[in-house]
Image (cartoon, grey):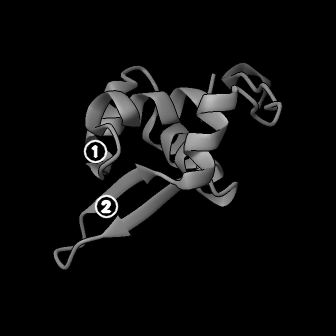
């Protein structure tokens, strides 16, 4: 299954606390997930305003938890996710 917003945010906090972490480190953290699934999960979490994405001049991507993401982590309130398994596609 695609990782939830909360799983993505907790992994970022574990890797870099309140700073930016390289996107590839986040993807490695979810071994077993495909690159496409991770791209979708990170994009979904970013669209909801829970994380920030930045690129450096060399084009490498970095992610960090946004203010809204920290609030969601503290309160434990996340939008319900639509569970999709790969077999259902």
At horizontal 67% and vertical 25% (from top left) the residue drawn is 86
Q: Quadrant of residue 72?
A: top right
Q: Quadrant of residue 74?
A: top right
The mark total stands at: 2
**Residue at the extreme bottom:** 57
Instruction: Identify residue for label 2.
Output: 61
At horizontal 54% and vertical 26% (from top left) the residue drawn is 7
Q: Residue 24 carries which label?
A: 1
At horizontal 27% and vertical 39% (from top left) the residue drawn is 16
Q: Position of residue 35 (x, y in %)?
A: 43, 41
| Residue 4 seen from this side | no
**Between discs 1 and 2, the one toward the N terminus:** 1
Q: Vertically, is 59 above or below 25? A: below
Q: Disc 1 to disc 2, how far (Cα)?
A: 8 Å
Q: Vertically, is 89 above or below 45? A: above
Identify the image quadrant of the C terminus.
Answer: top right
């Amino acid at each position: 299954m695609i990782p939830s917003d909360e799983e993505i945010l907790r992994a970022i906090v574990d890797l870099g606390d309140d700073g930016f972490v390289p996107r590839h480190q986040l993807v490695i953290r979810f071994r077993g997930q495909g690159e496409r699934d991770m791209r979708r999960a990170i994009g979904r979490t970013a669209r909801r305003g829970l994380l920030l994405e930045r690129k450096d001049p060399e084009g490498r991507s970095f992610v960090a938890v946004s203010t809204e993401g920290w609030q969601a982590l503290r309160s434990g309130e996340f939008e319900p996710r639509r569970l999709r398994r790969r077999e259902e596609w």
